[in-house]
Amino acid sequence: MNDSSPMRMPKPIQPTGLATPGGHYSHAVVANGFVFVSGQLPIAADGTKRVDATFNEQT
């Protein structure tokens, strides 16, 4: 890392149209030019939990 570049605060990303995260996290965070994404849960955009759905049905 270049010592002369300023450190930027992480920016949480909350895309519209997606279910609100069920915890204290964001869908993604942008920090210092990198994008960090959270794990995928079987939750539909309307908040319906799809734990019994197959992988293909969830994607």
Image (tube, rainbow, N blue to C red):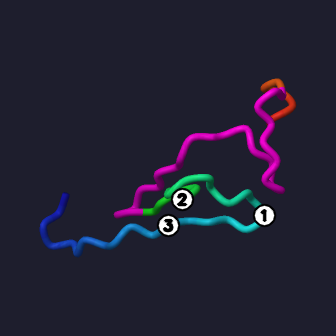
Query: How would you rate the neighbour count of disc 2 (Cα within 10 Å): few for under 14, some for 14-19, many for 20 or more?
Result: some
User: What residue did someone put label 1 on?
Assistant: 17
The amino acid type, in three-letter code, at marker 2 is Ser
Residue 13 drawn at (x, y percent): 56, 65
Left or right: residue 43 compared with residue 8: right
Q: Hey, which quadrant is residue 7 in on the image? A: bottom left
Magenta highlight on residue 37: yes
User: What residue did someone put label 3 on?
Assistant: 12
Disc number for residue 26: 2
- Boundaries of the magenta span: 31-53
Left or right: residue 56 compared with residue 6: right
- Whether pointer 3 and pointer 2 mark residues with C-beta atoms closer than 8 Å, the reply is yes
In-front residue for pair 51/56: 51
Magenta highlight on residue 19: no
Which is nearer the N-term, disc 3 or disc 2?
A: 3
Residue 29 drawn at (x, y percent): 47, 60
Position of the C terminus, as image quadrant, is: top right
Cα separation between marks 1 and 3 = 16 Å
Q: Secondary structure at mark 3?
A: strand
Which is nearer the N-term, disc 1 or disc 3?
A: 3
Q: Secondary structure at mark 2?
A: loop
Residue 27 drawn at (x, y percent): 58, 56
Q: Hey, which quadrant is residue 34 in on the image? A: bottom left
